[in-house]
Amino acid sequence: MEQFYANSPATLVLLIVTTIISLIAFLNPGLWRFLALEPYRMFHEKEFHGVVTSGFVHSGLGHLFINMYVLYMFGPTLESLLESPQFVIVYVVGLVVGSLYPLFKYRNRPEYVAIGASGAISGVVFAFCLFIPFAPLGLIFLPGIHFPAILFAILYVAYSVYAMKKAKDNIGHEAHLAGALGGVVATIIIQPLSVKVFIEQIQTLFT
């Protein structure tokens, strides 16, 4: 844990804080609702904190685990490439941009509620792929099987699109797509050379 904190302090703090707040919110529906993204309430009552706070609550243990597991997989490496302050900027930009789409789309639907760090996580995943698109990744439930990071990113977004169309839960699936875009744009602004790095690695497929 000390080694993890020394190399990836921002990732560790985000993991711990998000997990603690989510677990507390599971036991406190009032807090869960207050922190969630409710576009109608935000526009009519001018309470916009949910744009950020919704990233710290989740719909259940499975939702929380998946997001934190993906952050654990991608966060430390990206943080080492960008440094902690820049990593936090990418994370927050992904979170905020991911919240903007549902915020405006559902502003006249009082029943709509969305939660989850999906936008921020997507931003981290796609920022990671700018630097190391072919990094081999494995899954804890498929030991010994590895696939490139960029494939994971594509499947992650594909699932988001599918789940968004189903619209049977309170997970902010739209945030996956918007957050991914936000994370990529923020990374390019912070590290313009990331585009060159990405293109050069893609070109290796054809040489």
Image (tube, grey):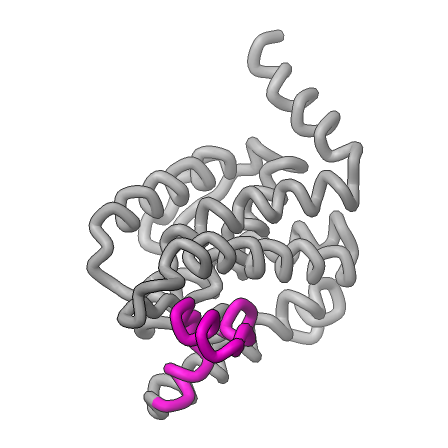
Against 87, is 15 above or below? below
Q: Nearer the viewer, residue 141 or 204?
A: 204
Q: From the viewer's perspective, tell me whether residue 131 is left or right of residue 50.
A: right
Q: Is residue 133 magenta?
A: no
Residue 44 vertical placement versus 166 (above, below): below
> What x and y, as percent, mark residue 180?
53, 45
Q: Position of residue 186 (x, y in %)?
A: 69, 47
Residue at 53% across, 59% down:
71
- Magenta span: chief secondary structure: helix
The magenta region covers 30-53
Most extreme residue toward the top is 207
* Any part of residue 204 in sight: yes
- The quarter of the picture where the N terminus appears is bottom right
Report the residue at 25% width, 46% height from top.
165
Find residue 23 and report its horizontal and vertical position in percent: 41, 84
In the image, taking residue 178 as reference, residue 88 lies left or right, namely right
Task: Between residue 179 and residue 158, name the one nearer to us.
Answer: 179
